Image (cartoon, rainbow, N blue to C red):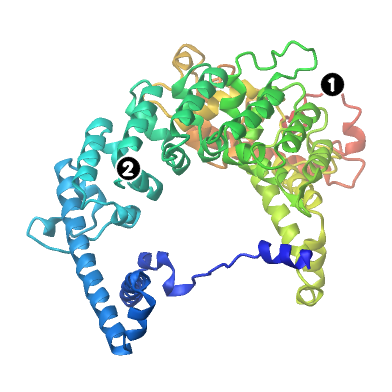
Amino acid sequence: EEEEEEEEDDKRRVLFILGGDHPSAHLRRKPEQVERFDRLSLLEAAAMDLSMEVAKMTTEAFDSRKDCLLGDMFSTCLEKRDKEYEETRKARFEGLMETLDSVGILKDCVAANHDSLVEGSDNVYLKDTHKCLRHAQFEDKEVCTIVKTFVNTFGEKVAVKCFKSGTFVCGLCQKETSEAFLERFKRVLAVFEGNKDLLAKACCDSLFAALADEDDGGAFISRIEKIIDDYFDGNCNLFATRCCESLLAAINSKAKTDELRERIDLLIADDDDGDNDLYGDKNTSLAASAGNSFYSGLSGVEGDKYAKFLLEIRKRFYKENPDGFASACSRNYMCALLSYKKDGKLTVELISDLAEIQKELFAGSDLGMTQALWQNFSEKKREEKKWTTLTDAEKEKFTDAEKEKRSMKAVHAFIQQERLLLEKERGMRGEARVPLQPLGPRDALFQRIRQELAAPKKGVINPNAAKRRTTYWSKWSVTEIAWLLFLVKKFGKDWPKIATCFGIADCFNARTAKACKLTYSKQLKEMEQEKENEDGDDESKENHPAKRRIINCKRWSVTEIA
């Protein structure tokens, strides 16, 4: 009996609201659904008013009422609610138009009928991006005043971005929370040293939700300041650029923040010699590691286990390249794969997969997975997991060839595909292992190239390029041709971009797009000719492999060097 009573205590009544009755139905575009939702909302509100009036009545008074009288009471409640709704709606839209127009952002938030509003139109069509503004209590004068203060303080750019967030609107545009929310937002601006552009970069739902917390909003700002000081070298610009939803969500309470800091310290302080100087300034790692999946994993229920897995990946695959590890953590594909759970628990599946990938594709070097390679591998893993969820009957619908292809482990399919692609592009055959980086590790150079391509500058891309050898007609060196082949693999036949890479790299001659294109075409022809020579079966030919192996004094071909 005691067990039954405990089970009864554990039970909770749950109401599931589906379809057109759900509160989100007003966001739909179909007018008939919106109208039905409005009617239902009105009826429900009137029914609640009636129930409160009946609750105030004595038992005798209630019993003396006839059904018709209760019906009249309900009609009265419905008429009252209908009138209040109409008045509130009208006052809200008038307040919205007047407030937003006075601060110059009405056109940014209202749709195509903006011009008709000045002619007295009652219809206000908010843009899809700003529909959450319909929940703002613009019928309240205090809220309107606070909204004006916010826009004037933070500028139109920040305001227009913030008003896209329903979380922000609920914090700033509700009478109960607006004043306190505005004061906290001013404190956040001070964290970014009054720079409104930096604040705009950091704005997101996680930030707004934490600031709206009446009990913890102020402490949340203090935690942001300490995170910037301890992990971003006090650089608020760096923090604004690299922060994300998951990071701000992970520090929205003291307990979660303490756990996150412990796990981050584990990753950035252990260098096997006890000096805690793996990255020097701590901001080097955390700024490069920024990514939603990275912080989601570290702040999760199994965050300690996740951090240990990351640490193992760093030690096994990036021992000599900690900055490369930090960069890999910023790739959401890797961190999302590491978050994969089986039976509700994290697994070491990714680590074993990476061991095979390094052995087959990056032997003798750190793991050189690019963003494109991570994306390809992630897609293979999704296909593998999707195949395992199919029933035998569903699998029978595929051909034998498709079954064989889909049943192959993702890591093996990935290695096979990348090796075939690499050998095809370089014109090599029969190699057991071919490193994916023919020129060896050039992490610093690659990093500079990524930065320059991400933010191209006007004029000369690299001032040193003009002082270097700019004789585009000069003979190409073997190293330059190998560099050209690598860039074509990385960027495709985007000749202007490839020419830009030659301009950035101080160790090479500056080359034009046309020169790159012509040299690549010439090189392809040479590689095809060498391939045809290798396929010859007549051992009497001078170019037969049996004879070429012993002619060590001849000039090495570009393909051989690559």
Disc 2 secondary structure class: helix
**In the rendering, at what x and y percent does residue 291 appear?**
57, 37
Residue 12 sits in quarter: bottom right
Residue that sits furthest to the front in the current view: 60
Give SS at disc 1.
Answer: loop
First along the sequence among labels 2 and 1: 2
Does residue 473 appear in the picture of this structure? Answer: no
**Residue occupied by mark 1:** 553
How dense is the environment of label 1, judged by Cα within 10 Å: few (below 14), some, or many (20 and up)?
few
Lateral position of residue 94 relative to residue 259, left or right: left
Marks 2/1: CA–CA distance? 79 Å
The amino acid marked with disc number 2 is Leu
Q: Which residue is mark 2?
A: 172
Tag count: 2
Q: Which x, y percent locates residue 404?
A: 82, 64
- Residue at point 58% right, 34% down? 519
Res 484 visible: yes
Looking at the image, residue 28 lies above or below residue 240: below
Give residue 429's mark: none
| Amino acid at pointer 1 | Cys
